[in-house]
């Protein structure tokens, strides 16, 4: 196995942090209605479901019926928002990167299945690319670089699944 250089390690850390921001930003926008994808009067704090727009209007293809059935479900809203927050924070901080990366890849896979076929390609879109990047970051131990992964691993050394 080839030893990674400091540049490669730092690049892995930067990619991990950027992927964390990809998850944390929609959480913040949907929670507060920052006016990017979510208007202020449509925020979760104002009582609007953070998943309704996507599930009701973006879901198409062979799984559309399944996703349409989830519209307005409070449990789905909480799971989605908690997932965005926890995945984003874990990736940014470099703690629990393995479980956050696998969870993020699963969330992205579900979002990909909700929009089949993708708009600009018969099967490939950013959900697949981001998911593969997350799996790579988990397996390359990216939490060890530019984050708290080393300290986290000392605390969780008996529970490697928490890496």
Image (cartoon, rainbow, N blue to C red):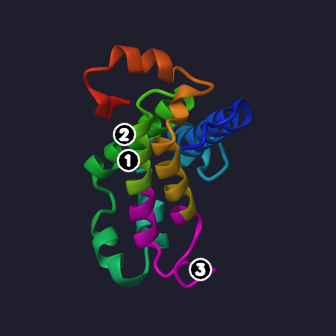
The answer to whether the residues at label 1 and label 3 have Cβ atoms under 8 Å apart is no
- Which residue lies under the disc numbered 3? 119
Distance between the alpha carbons at the discs numbered 3 and 2: 30 Å
Question: In the image, is residue 105 part of the stretch drawn in magenta?
Answer: no
Q: Residue at x 60, y 27 (%)?
A: 145
For residue 92, side relative to residue 151 (left or right): right
Q: Which residues are magenta?
A: 107-128
Q: Residue at x 46, y 68 (%)?
A: 112
Crowd tier of the residue under label 1, counting other residues whose Cα lies within 10 Å: few below 14, some 14–19, many 20 or above? some
Crowd tier of the residue under label 2, counting other residues whose Cα lies within 10 Å: few below 14, some 14–19, many 20 or above? some
For residue 70, side relative to residue 61 (left or right): left
- The spot of residue 139 in percent (x, y) is 46, 44
Circle on res. 118: none
**Which quarter of the rendered picture does the C terminus lie within?**
top left
Q: Would you say residue 14 is visible in this rendering?
A: yes
Helix, strand or loop at label 2? It is helix
- Which residue lies under the disc numbered 1? 103
Judging depth in this view, the residue of 159 and 2 nearest the camera is 2
Judging depth in this view, the residue of 51 and 158 nearest the camera is 158
Circle on res. 99: 2
């Amino acid at each position: 196995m080839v030893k990674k250089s400091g540049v490669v390690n730092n690049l892995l850390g930067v990619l991990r942090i950027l992927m964390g921001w990809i998850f944390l930003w929609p959480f913040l926008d949907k929670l507060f209605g920052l006016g990017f994808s979510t208007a202020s009067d449509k925020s979760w704090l104002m009582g609007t479901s953070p998943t309704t727009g996507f599930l009701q209007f973006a879901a198409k293809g062979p799984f559309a019926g399944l996703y349409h059935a989830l519209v307005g479900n409070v449990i789905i809203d909480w799971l989605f928002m908690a997932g965005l927050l926890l995945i984003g924070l874990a990736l940014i901080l470099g703690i629990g990167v393995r479980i956050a990366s696998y969870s993020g890849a699963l969330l992205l896979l579900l979002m990909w299945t909700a929009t089949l076929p993708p708009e600009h390609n018969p099967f490939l879109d950013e959900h697949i690319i981001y998911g593969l990047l997350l799996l790579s970051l988990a397996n390359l131990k990216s939490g060890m670089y530019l984050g708290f992964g080393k300290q986290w691993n000392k605390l969780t050394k008996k529970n490697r699944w928490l890496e």
